[in-house]
Amino acid sequence: MTLIVDASVALKWVLEEDGSDAARALVADEALAAPDLLFIECANVLWVKARRGNLSIGDAKAAYAAIEAVPIRAISTYLHAAAAQSIAFDLDRTPYDSLYLAVAMAENATLVSADAVFVKAASAHPLYRNSVRLL
């Protein structure tokens, strides 16, 4: 079965954080997909880290290239925006975060996220609890 991953997971592939080993294991063991939003979200986080001096520009670019090299099926966001908005209202979370869950539900897949606040909100909702899990 395909797993949907969000930017919180993808960034752990290239940044050493709690959960990085588990995130990297997904790449080796699972078929992965994500809304194409994942790529710009990752690029933005890496840009912010470089801007703040936490990464060099070269390291930020290399980290993004590494994310881009992961075999992940990119799914267009356009067809899932309305569902993401509905989920956002249901969970009181952003449409950006909710998009990943909308795609997971449309793909009959599970969203894996390191965003504990989002996972807690989705897990508490009867419509979404079976479509999300914490990394």
Image (cartoon, grey):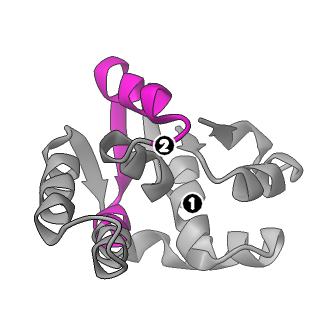
Indicate which disc, 1 or 2, sits on the residue closer to the N terminus: 2
Task: Tell me, for residue 126, which label it has, or none.
Answer: none
> Residue 104: within the magenta?
no
Give the quarter of the image for residue 97. Answer: bottom right
- Indicate left or right for 78 with 86 as reference: left
Residue 126 falls left or right of residue 101: right
Q: Give the answer, above or below, for where 5 lies relative to 84.
A: above
Amino acid type of the residue tagged 1 in the rendering:
Ala
Quote the CA–CA distance across marks 1 and 2.
26 Å
The dominant secondary structure in magenta is: helix
Residue 63: quarter of image: bottom left
Q: Is residue 68 above or below residue 95?
A: above
Query: Does the residue at mark 1 contact the one at mark 2 (Cβ under 8 Å)?
Result: no
How many marks on residues?
2
Query: In the rendered image of this protein, does residue 77 appear above or below residue 119?
Result: below
Residue 118, image quadrant: bottom right
Residue 62 drawn at (x, y percent): 12, 55
Residue 16 rendering spot, x and y as whole percentages: 40, 41
**Label 1 sits on residue:** 102
Q: Amino acid at mark 2?
A: Glu
| SS for callout 1 | helix
Estimate the x, y position of residue 83 in percent, counting from the top left. 60, 71
- Nearer the viewer's eye, disc 1 or disc 2? 2
Q: Residues within 10 Å of mark 2 (few under 14, many from 20)?
A: few
User: Which span is picked out in magenta?
Assistant: 17-42
Identify the residue under disc 2. 17
Which residue is pictured at 52% across the width and 58% down the height?
Answer: 100
Name the residue located 78 percent from the left edge and 43 percent from the top edge: 129
Residue found at the far front of this picture: 53
Q: How far across and down, in percent of the image, does residue 34 sit? A: 38, 52
